[in-house]
Image: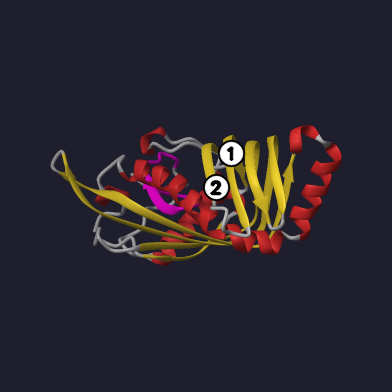
Amino acid sequence: RQRILLKQTNCVYSGISAADDPKPCKYGDGGCILQLCNKIFSERASEEDPSLNLKPLDPLKVDRMVISQGGNSAVGINLTFTDNFLYGLKDARVVKVKGFGSDLKAMHEVRIITKTLNLVGPYDIIGKVLILPISGSGQSNITVVNVKVIIRISGQPLEKHGETYLDVTDVNVSLKPEATYYHFSNLFNGDKALGDNMNAFLNENSKAIQKETGPPIEKAFSTLYLGIIKNVFSSRPYAKFFAEE
């Protein structure tokens, strides 16, 4: 028996034993996949599933994420998050699914909306934001609100042990938040006045900062989710994620 299980980057399936678990979907049945993904998001986002090489999605452990942008940009920073947690995926909702048919070379796409995502944990930053220099290391909380997410997944067939697996080779994540809020503790070696002023400046100019930092942030999330999705699809042959024809 199988179940469908979604993480914020894509829809996947795994074995289940409870009597009230949903039936797996057929190849390419976007409506079915959408409904089952939302059920899993709301009911099982906090569960670990070793059979799928999948750790809990909410909170999602982010071991390391680097956002780097050159000095020629209005926001030229090197920002590293280490041992962070991403909260909010349990409230995400899938609104459209394309792909996941029998052609392993085809593009798959999942569109998601979520009210709030919070990335919380240690950070280290140096660079400039618009006209001001910024530096510091400490704890941060980055909150995005009313986010529209598009996740595109591509791969190729991989023959292994006489079975065909989906080898995920690329994940592209698009993030379009309505608003972004920043808080960095211990900026400027703990100078409270400078730190408070910088946090206020960041939030007053969040739209401009969001526009400038969008591409490197999306690249960082694409890298994060590529590893997760690749692990999931390596857990079993592609056909076994779906209902038997």
From the top left corner, tell me how far across and down residue 7 is, in percent.
48, 49
Quarter where residue 115 is shown: bottom right
Q: Looking at the rendered structure, which numbered label has been put on residue 81? A: 1
Is 53 on the left or on the right of 164, as rendered? right
Q: Residue at x 34, y 64 (%)?
A: 99
Distance between mark 1 and mark 2 Cα atoms: 8 Å
Looking at the rendered structure, the secondary structure element under dot 2 is strand
Q: Which residue appears at 48% of the width and 60% of the height?
A: 35
Identify the residue under disc 2: 67
Q: Nearer the viewer, residue 2 or 162?
A: 162
Q: Position of residue 43 (x, y in %)?
A: 56, 46
Q: 52 left or right of 157? A: right
Residue 9 badge? none
Please state the total of marks drawn on the protein image: 2
Q: Which residues are drawn in magenta?
A: 4-18
The front one of 11 and 125 is 125
